[in-house]
Image: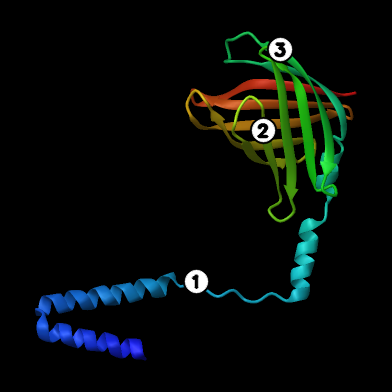
Amino acid sequence: MKKILLSMSVMALCFTSCKKEVKVETEITTTDTAKVVTEEAPEAEKPMDSVAEMEAWQKYMTPGEAHKFLAADNGSWTNEMTFWHDENSKPEKATSTSETKMILGGRYQESNYKGNMMGMPFEGRSTVAYDNSTKEFISTWIDNMGTGMMVMKGEMSPDGKSLDFKGEMVDPTKEKAVWCRELFTVVDANTRKMEMFCMKNGKQHKNMEIIMKRK
């Protein structure tokens, strides 16, 4: 109430000492401001029952069938890697080994890679999650040949044999993030195939393939 009386007093002073046009402009500004504040006021959320809240968190944190799918990759692997600079270039070969395991109570998959690439020691790490709430797989990748992180989101194929991820990775030659895709396929119980694609000249270009064999 004190603020309202103060505002009325200020408006009265403006009326007696200022031109009519200034008064109208002040009133419009004040009204518009009040309107904006009213429109931007967030709608109050309804409180959630404590039991229902606990059940929601329990459902969110409990590993399910998607996590069992990831756990099937646990173990040691040898990886035959093939790279293509563009669709007309000759393939380049490299090898690596990897160790895959589920961490944090079977909720996330972690894989550590080691090998040689372009005459240099290579080391990389990936994590894969399945978010029970958003119903999507999430993949991250870091390695010693960059300083960024690749983040992708994907879904499982209807036959339950592959994961199709899409996201962004940094292209240092362009100094910006570019579109990328990863297709991970279960070939058989002890064989996996990972294919990477980037966008070139408006179409997908396959730039890497890894055939993984369980030791």
Discs 1, 3 touching: Cβ within 8 Å: no
Tell me: 30 left or right of 47.
left
* First-in-chain label (1 vs 3): 1
Q: Residue 101 at what x, y percent from top left?
A: 84, 37
Mark 2 sits on what residue?
Answer: 142
Q: Residue at x 78, y 74 (%)?
A: 51
Residue farthest to the top, as pictured: 90
Q: Residue 41 at what x, y percent from top left?
A: 45, 73
Examine the rendering and report whether any part of residue 99 can be seen. yes
* Image quarter hosting the N terminus: bottom left
Neighbour class for label 1 at 10 Å: few (<14), some, many (≥20)? few
* Picture mark count: 3
Mark 3 sits on what residue?
Answer: 93
* Cα–Cα gap, marks 2 and 1: 39 Å
Where 126 falls versus 118 (above or below)? below
Amino acid at pointer 3: Lys
Mark nearest the camera among 3 and 2 is 2
